[in-house]
Amino acid sequence: MPSTFFGLSIGKTGLNAAQIGWNTTVHNSSNINTKGYSRQVASFEAGTPVSVYSRAGMAGTGVSLIGVERQRNIYYDEKYRISNAAYGNYNTKEYYMTSVQNYFKETDKDTQGLTGYFTNLYNAFEDLQKNGADSTKRTAAIESADNLADFVNYLGTSLQSVQKEANADIKTTAERINSIASQVATLNKQINTLEQQGGVANDLRDQRDRLIDELSEYGNISVTETNRGDDKSVLNEFTIKLDNKTLVDTYKYNQLIVSSVDGKVNQNDIDGLYTLSWKDGQDFDSSSPTLGGKLQALFEIRDGNNKTAFTGQADINTNIGDDFVVVKGTNCNDANKLNIPAEKGTIMIGAKQYYYSSFSVEIDDATGEYTYTFEGLYDDVGNKKITQDAAGKQVSIGSSIDYKGVPYYQAQLNEFVRTYATSFNKIHNAAEDLSGQKGMDFFNGKSAVTGKNYELYEEIKSFSSNGTAEGKDGAKTGTSYYNVTALNFCVTDEIKDNVMKFALASDIDKGVDCVDMLDQIIAGKTDKSMFKQGTPMEFLSTFTANIGIDTQQASLFATSQSNITKAIDEQRMSISSVDSDEEAMNMVKYRSAYELSAKMISTMSQIYDVLLNM
């Protein structure tokens, strides 16, 4: 049976409940502008009743606190993080693709783009066609060609700057992921320690969720929290996986190791590209289609080749101990489309990674097929020979990434300058300059080693990455057009120094005004057989249009995904955010409840005072 002073105990529970509710409301109001804060609600239930020792019935004991709980919906959290990963991916692509588009300047009305420089070149040729002996017009034509070459060089170096920025961003992103993993592991320990002692770790859980929300922008993650028992005070296991690889396991966390690779996989790649690996030894697949988020976008921008990676088969006569590998049946039998590194190339033979120092190519006269020999092989631990059976194994240089990133655009520029220069030089070589000499190569490349122009061969039966080529006529000096890239493309120095070297006539004896070979050069502008896309201008128009389309698509997806993510977040916030009006009402409600409990205690005190003084 309850004691005589039982009513005071009931009143006390009311005071305590009102005070807890009041404090919770004040805490919510104080954090109304705190990012990631989840509204907290104090939950109560009627106290356990006691028997009154009468024929029937129980007496109430007041109110008991169930707990102070965060208002959070796991479903919306998961939905938000999936959407945020997609937004991080598209937003990153939009940023870098916009940079690429700005470099090409095709949408800038105040400056010329690649197609504009090409049009100017042919305008200068047509002007020269009217008076081939005019040195001023010759100079103007050569300067227009040089301007085109300079702009191609500018594009090549600009694309490298985009690749360099994306590469640095990969390192920064990996370091941030590591930092978040470390903080989450620390918070897990604090949360478990507090909750095992019967405390409530709502604010710590908010901090953890805020970090996980940020982490979701960098890649596809999955979060799992498992309680080891029915009692909430029992230890919780908390895991985060990034692309299905464990990043956080309660108190332990994995790390992404950032390291610079020795080799390259594309001819125009910058030095020191970063590769990622897991500290616990798990493989990190940078080309994984499920990686998602900003990290996937960065790798696609930096390494995307539109699925054109070099592949072939190692010759069946390859032996363990060889320091070279012969590769046949490749997917590239055209030097103008070949974009593997000349040196320091990374090559996969079967499942083993090696590096090569140089390569050479033999061309089959009958079929036109290329046979490659990659020389000076070595691996990551310094072995300078093949250390396992490679005969007949698949050989590849780089991964086939289904995205048009920097390597793809560099390859397109390389193909253009090589193919166009080959066609142009073939006509120019057949012409005669004003001194009666056969025309030299008009367009050229410049060796990074010697600083001199190449002597190019169009018809070759073999060539090597070091710049030497053997022509079908048996000549062993010179190089192939493989060595001409967007980075070194130029007008031959000797022609720039002496405009009389510009060969325009089939026979100079016909007179200095003879420009019949220039007519052929101009006709090349409409040669639909030069490129798969058609004429040179059609190639450039398609190329630059694709950049615009890719940029517009990235921007459209980024905007759309941003709207979706915001909508999901608004749904989340409708549950989790603090409403100032609602909290103001709660303040009034708990104040009234407190005053009522206090009034009850005061009244009962007066009753007990009368009773005790009787």
Image (cartoon, grey):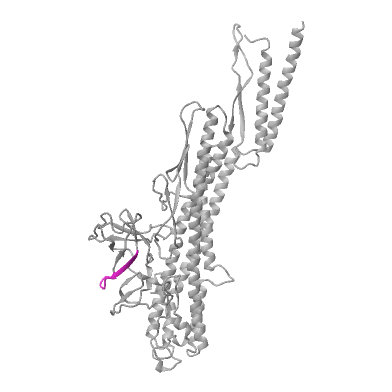
Where does residue 339 sit, x and y in percent of width and height?
39, 66
Q: Is residue 595 above or below residue 368?
A: above
Could you tell whether 509 is left or right of 144 in the image?
left
Instruction: Left or right? Give the position of 550 relative to 349.
Output: right
* Residue 239 shows in this picture: no
Residue 600 % position (x, y): 72, 18
Q: Is residue 529 above or below residue 206?
A: below
From which residue to which does the magenta span run?
A: 357-368
> In the figure, 4 relative to 255: above or below?
above
In percent of width and height, residue 115 lies at 50, 72
Say whether residue 265 is visible. yes
Is 538 situated above or below 195?
A: below
- In the rendered image, the quadrant that contains the N terminus is top right
**Residue 232 percent coordinates (x, y):** 51, 28
Question: Does the magenta run of residues contain 38?
Answer: no
Which residue appears farthest toward the left when viewing the image? 317
Q: Residue 355: name its quadrant.
A: bottom left
Residue at the far front: name it: 382
Residue 399 quadrant: bottom left
Relative to 37, 472 lies left or right:
left
Viewer-proximal residue among 30 and 524: 30
Say which quarter of the image contains residue 601: top right
